Structure formats: structure tokens, C-alpha cells
Image (tube, rainbow, N blue to C red):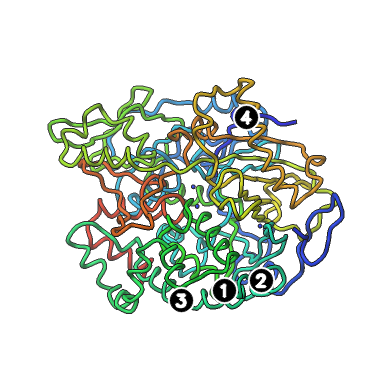
Amino acid sequence: RERVADRARGGRAPRGRRAGPGRRRPGQAVPRPRRRGHRVRRRGVASVRDAPRPAAPRPSGAHAAHNVHGRDGQVPGPVPARAAGRHRPRARRAARAAVESHETDVVVIGAGIGGLCAGALCAKYGKRVTVVESHDVAGGAAHSWKRDGYTFESGPSLYSGMSRWPTTNPCGQVLHALDEPLPCVYYNTWMCHLPEGSFLTEVGNDQFVDVLKEYVPDVDGVNAVDEWLRLKSLMKPLASASSALPPSAVRTDAFAAVTLARFVPGLLAAAPALPEIMAPYSKFLDKNEIKHPFVRNWMETLCFLLSGAPASGTLAAEIGYMFDDWYRPNSTLEFPVGGSEAIVEALTRGLTKNGGRLELRSHVESIVFDEEKKRATGVRLKSGSVIVATDAVISNATVWDTLKILPENAMKVVEGGDDWVREVNETKTCESFMHLHLGIDAAGLPDDLEIHHIYVEDWARGVTAPQNMVLVSIASVLDPSLAPEGKHVIHAYTPGNEPLDIWQGLEQGTPEYEKLKEERSAVLWRAVEKAIPDVRARVEKSFVGSPLTQQRWQRRHKGTYGGTGWITPDSDTIPITTASTPMDGLLVVGDSNFPGPGVPSVAAHGWSAAHELVPFWKQCQMLDKVAP
């Protein structure tokens, strides 16, 4: 029944035991208890069918034409339905066209979220921009792919702060800067399958207190409800401080004093909490004596979901931002109409309508380096074409993969280059993912099936332990257009806790590889069965992806999720979010740079890259719009 995701063009996810109040029968799906605030849609779209879809064509879909140009170019229309089925190779051949050598201001390597944010912002600022992408679809870790009416998402599915305004989410601010509204369905619930039991929880109100009362007993005289309410109170200053300075205001030259000036009052008000938000979150928990095991485990879970690291490796500012976004009254989560592909398409439109161009299936062979000027001056494609960049090359490849395409010894002749190379090689890699993509028959499933499910097997092993946590997304619950009528599409994945080493040296398609893939995907099936116990009998499409899938299709170093290790319990200094490198003309963005994985993080790099290339007065004009 299973087909290999390596052949099905799978990708990665860059960033849940009793069934509710009663028992369930074998084979019965977990229903969603009808509690207050259930699936709130306060603003925006009341249902997917009512959602306005962008009028512009969808150039970044799985079967888009090869080149997407703005201004003087023509955005291609959708590929005919026949091409979107099993005739994909023919569609690829028809779309194939070599990218001609040309000159531009900025060339971006990779059309992931970070690369698209950087490229679209540069185009918005008036730069000539070319984004080159090795894959035949934009989006990087957030791309989607289609099979027989199903839309399978390879990347993140849990969003907030993307469509509502104002927002502190850097990606939401990018979309606002580009005048690209993102239609979303709003909801406020998710299902948890934890050692304590299976229960529904909500964002935006105190329903979590009811969960704690029902499922979590006192431990050593510590009451979980009291501990949680105390923690929420303690988090308020951190939440305010975390949003006091948006990434869109930061720059690395002397004019930072100008762009930051408007935020000084807020920074002064947040001053008492600033040392705490710039430290590992575990220090905050320890300092405030948060001791109840469940509360600590819950916060460890949220840290891992946000950063791919435990609390000891997660900046407190990230948790402060999350608390501000999720736990203020009447907060909601968001699901983009069309899935993560809708975000990619919005960023692509922002690029092309401002004169930029997106070149798909355009693999970068090397970065061109001018030894005399000691700067990056463009890229050379596998086809032999050369794209000259007069201002900068922005790499959205991982820093390890960026090193591979730099000319040998180029960094050695650049001041500070050796130190940068050493830092790159010493940067720890996050572990990777296992993916299970399913298309299933939804007949007889409850109408109130939840979109998100978090599954944890054993708190004692820790949330970062391999095979211990799984996220399940049933996106068609909120957007039926992602699956054929009467069907559901499911994505289950281990969120950055799949070891890289056990996959190295294996060859895809061999019996050894297939056996390991079957073994390592078993926990994904267990997690899905918590939500839909009879799911195996319902399966119509099944694909399994491994770290090698990601390494192959995403061209990511060892299939890693990104970088980590900048934050430790002993950290005295914290890096800043910057796209700069010692090499003139070379900037890097993406999840292998501090602060690591996550859509907000990589979007922040997009802001950083753009503001390395534009004068401060243009940045100030932009701040009037996105952070008044």
C-alpha cells in the first residue's frame, strides 16, 4: 500500500488517552468535544467556500511553468488539469527552458520562505531581483505537491499572526508590506494525545485550566492549575518585551540609531525583562521555580515546536512572542486557504508584481567570486548560464550547502572569512523528520474532527527524544479543497527529532533503506491512529519520507531541519539575527542561521537581508507601514 515519498516528490516540515470526556469504541474516531469557543472564526473567512481567492494566477504550484517573470514578463496561467495528474513528466518537459545569462541587482539562491521574503522585499524596495530555485516548485520546506486531487503539504501547518493586522509575526509583516492579504480560516482548538490522556485544548482563553483540573493531579503538593496561572502572570512582561522591537527595524550600520528610535519608549518600558528574554527559557522557569512536571513538560513541548530545541536551547523571547500571540484573550490560530502553498504564492506574487522574477529548475552550480574585489558577484547555473548580481547574492541554501558552492579558498582571502567558516562548521545541525502523507476515505468520520493532533508517548524520555513526539495535521478538515470530495488528506511527522546518522550511507530504494523506513514510520501510524483508529482501512494514498528524502529533494545538508546550539544554559551572549557574512556581496538567510527553524525566524532573515541593501530612509518609510 505504501509508495515511497522519494519517488513521489515528498519534502519536509520550515516553524495533541481517553477520548475527551468519555471512552471511545474501537475503530471510532476521536470526536471534538463541543466546548466554549470551539473553532472560532472571529474575523476573515467563515468557511473555506466563502473565502476569496487571489485573482492572480498561481505560478508556484506543483506544475507551474518554468519561469515566472514580473513587469515585462508574463505570468503563466494554471496548467491544464490533465497535466496535474499522472502526466507530470510531460508537463516538466514542456516547461523546460534554459535561463539566459543576465544582470540583476540581487540574485537569491533558493525559493524557500526566507529566500522569497528577502527577494520580494528587495523587489518592493525597487531592486532588480532574480530568485533561482533548483526544484520545479517554490516554497522550500513549505512546498506542496499533488496527487489525484490530494494536496500534500511537506511543511508547517500551525500558523498565527499571518493575516490579521497589526501583527508581530515577521512573515505577516512581510505580506502586509507587499500588500498581499492572506485569506485564512480561524480556529482555536487542537487535540492532545499525551501520557495523561487525550483531550481538546484551546488558545485564547482559560480552557486549559479545565484540562489541568480534569487530567493532571497534584505532584509533591504542587497544584498544576495554580502553577499554570502563576506562569501566565509571570509571562506577561516577557510577552510585552518580546514584541517591543520588530525585526523589520533592525540594521547593522550606524543608521540603526534612526530606524530604532521610534521603538525606544517601548524598549525602555520593557527594559526590566530584556535580560530575561535574551536568555534560555529554562533559566526563566528555574528562576521562578516552575516545578510541576506537567507544566514543565508542556512548556518543553511548546519550545520544541517553536525552535526545534528544548527550553534550555530556546530563547525566552520566542516563548514570549508565542504567549503574546496564543494566550491573550480571544486569540485564534490561522489556516491559510489553500494551505502553506497560499503563503508561497502570496510571496511569489509580491516578488513578480514588483518586477522580480522566479526561475524554477535552475540549479546553482557555484557562487561567482571576484578575487580582486573580494566580493560575490553572481551565480553560475548548472546549465552554464551566469547571473551577475551588482548588489548581492542572497543564499537561502543552508550555510553548510552555501559553503559547498563557494569557490575553494574564497573565504580565506576575505577578512574574517576563516572565522565564519569555522562558526559554520561548528554550528550544530537539528535532527530531521519522518513524514507520513495519507489520502483517506472520510466516510463516517465525525464532522468535528480536529485539524491538529499532538502525540507524545513518554514524558520521561523528553520531547526531543527520537520517535517520542509526532504532529498530525488533517488540513482538509478546514479546507476541503485540499482533498477530493468525501476524502481527507493527512500529514504526520516527527518534528525535528529523527536522527540523521542512522540514515547516512544508505541508498534509497535498497531493501535496507525500505526496511528502516518502515520501522521508523511506525510511530507515525500510531499517532494517526489516535485520531482515526481505523485509518489503515481507509487509506487510498500513502507516502513515507525520510531524512534522505529531504536531503535529495530539498538539497539540504544531510536532510537537516536547520541549525541549533546557539543557546545553552551557560550562554552569556546571544547572537543577533543578521543575514550578513564577512564576504562583501554575500548574505545568507534561512533556518540554519540564528535563531533557527520556523517561519517567523526565516522571515526575520528576509527583513535583515533587504535592509543590508537599502538606505535607512527607505526602511523608515517601510516601518511607517508595517510597524507604525
Horizontal placement of 417 versus 361: left or right? left
215 left or right, relative to 486:
left
**How far across and how far down the image is residue 266, in percent?**
33, 76
Query: For the residues marked 3 and 4, what is the alpha-carbon distance in whole angstroms?
Result: 45 Å
Q: Nearer the N terminus, badge 2 or badge 1? A: 2
Q: Determine which residue is flagged by label 4.
A: 516
Query: Decide: marks 3, 2 in contact (CB < 8 A)?
Result: no
Q: Position of residue 216 (x, y in %)?
A: 67, 68
Q: Are marks 3 and 4 in contact (CB under 8 Å)?
A: no
- Kind of residue at badge 3: Lys
Residue identifier under label 2: 212
Q: What is the number of the mark on residue 409?
A: none
Tell me the quarter of the image containing the N terminus: top right
Distance of label 2 from label 1 (alpha carbons): 9 Å
Quadrant assignment for the C terminus: bottom left
Distance, label 4 to label 2, CA atoms, is 38 Å
Tell which tag, 3 or 4, sits nearer the viewer: 4
Upstream in the sequence, badge 1 or badge 3? 1
Q: Residue 228: which numbered mark, if any?
A: 1
